[in-house]
Image (spheres, rainbow, N blue to C red):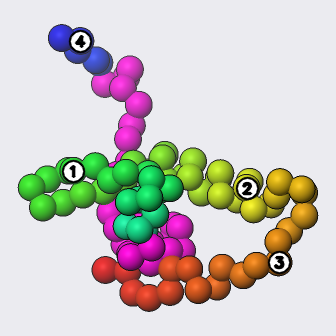
Amino acid sequence: MTVHSPASVPAVQILRLPQVCKVTGLGRSMIYQLESQRRFPSRVRIGLRAVGWVESEVQLWLASRIEHHRVGVSGERTGKSNAHVGVGPCA
């Protein structure tokens, strides 16, 4: 068994669902839908009835979405709107 000293273990921040909604701009159902499609980071169990997402994984996902949409396959914007994505309460 490997024992890590506190200095060698990177700090991991866990985001709860309301925080993930705020950071991503997505609603609860969209987050769960994308997760089930393996298009969003998987949640981790942090208690008997509590889950969260690793902040660094969510940030990487956001960065990849931004990059994907800023630089399309042909370098052009599609003109499609995602205004409907994430509409609704996040609780």
Locate residue 36, reporting x and y percent.
38, 60
Q: Which amino acid type corresponds to the residue marked 3 in the rendered image?
A: Gly
Between the residue at mark 3 and the residue at mark 2, the CA separation in whole angstroms equals: 14 Å
Name which residue lies at 51% across and 67% down: 23
Q: Which amino acid type corresponds to the residue marked 4 in the rendered image?
A: Thr
Name which residue lies at 82% across and 78% down: 79
Dot 2 crowding, Cα within 10 Å, few <14, some 14–19, many 20+: few
Between the residue at mark 2 and the residue at mark 1, the CA separation in whole angstroms equals: 29 Å
- The numbered dot on residue 2 is 4
Q: Earlier in the sequence, mark 2 or mark 4?
A: 4
Q: Is residue 71 visible?
A: no
What residue does disc 3 label? 79
Residue 60 lies within the magenta run: no
Q: Which amino acid type corresponds to the residue marked 1 in the rendered image?
A: Arg
Locate residue 39, reporting x and y percent.
50, 56
Q: Which amino acid type corresponds to the residue marked 2 in the rendered image?
A: His
